Amino acid sequence: MSNEETAAVKELLYQLADDDFIHSYRGSEWLGLAPHIEEDVAASSITQDTMGHAAMFYQLLEELDEGDANQLAHDRPASERKNAIILELENGPGHYMGEPAYDWAFAVVRNYFYTQAKMIKIQSLQSSSYQPLADIAVKVRMELYYHLLHWKTWFIQLMGSGHEEAMTRMKAAIEKTSSDIRGVFSYGGHHDSFVQEGLIEDEAVLLERWQQSVTPVLEGVGLGNVEAGLALGDGRKGIHTKDLETALDTLREVYAIDKAATW
């Protein structure tokens, strides 16, 4: 690969890896707190799959001489992270080791919107000019089909429940999530290099596909289309909230004990 293509591949991999890494962590916080035991098992399995996806992307970065995959995952500061801001936001007030007051509605909406976005991006990546990434996309898509089915089902059930509190919380979660979901599609100023090198399709094209995918579901539960925003900024450019710093401090606790150890 040329230097330009290598740089573009690395940037895209950081975005993909960091998205799944922090999203998986937020999912793991629901362990033991999901609405019922079956969901506890299902959500935990999805979370584990997602962390596995992040690990594959970090491994590709290691193979491109970016450093050890574990170090890339755990030891980079928040300012170097490329994840979309919507994925780093806390599940709700409190702490899972104390008295958490997490919002299941927000979890469902964020998981559904992100998983649908990820599916569209993964489908595009299956035709990526970077073959190792295209190969991983094929593997990820097989698991992602079930992830998307799971969260879409939850979304429809809660919105169609007729329960006033459930619908009120879901609508608030939809507004919160949609206001920053565009960050998942952002390339952080690297649009030209990604598209010209054939790594992935135009971000506007993928965003439009996402809109076309979620709109029928929204209309099916009596809602209109949502406007994908970037209210808190673009995480691809190193803009993040304190939620990310707090999460990373927790994530690296064990790793920091002995960074040279094999866990």
Image (spheres, rainbow, N blue to C red):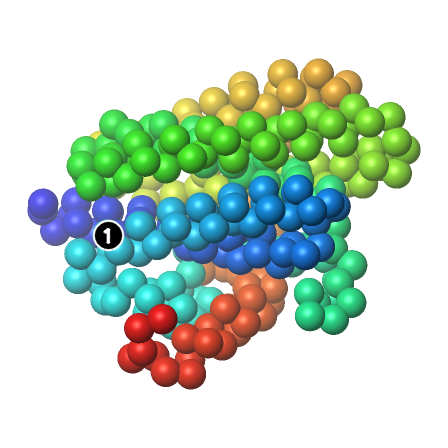
Q: Quadrant of the N terminus?
A: top left
Q: Residues within 10 Å of mark 1 (few under 14, many from 20)?
A: many
In front: 189, or 28? 28
Query: Image point 54% across, 72% down: which residue?
Result: 250
Residue 74 image offset from top left, x and y in percent: 40, 68
Query: Image point 87% across, 26% down: which residue?
Result: 162
Query: Image point 68% across, 65% down: which residue?
Result: 96
In front: 120, or 160? 160
Q: Residue furthest left?
A: 2
Callout 1 secondary element: helix
Q: Is residue 35 left or right of residue 177?
A: right
Residue 94 image offset from top left, x and y in percent: 74, 66
Query: Image point 9% across, 46% down: which residue?
Result: 2
Residue 117 image offset from top left, x and y in percent: 49, 33
In front: 85, or 48? 48
Residue 83 image offset from top left, x and y in percent: 46, 53
Residue 179 in sight here: no
Q: How many marks?
A: 1
Residue kind at label 1, given as amino acid type: Leu
Q: Is residue 231 left or right of residue 171?
A: left
In front: 117, or 187? 117
Q: Quadrant of the C terminus?
A: bottom left
**Residue 67 picture quarter:** bottom left
Residue that label 1 marks: 60
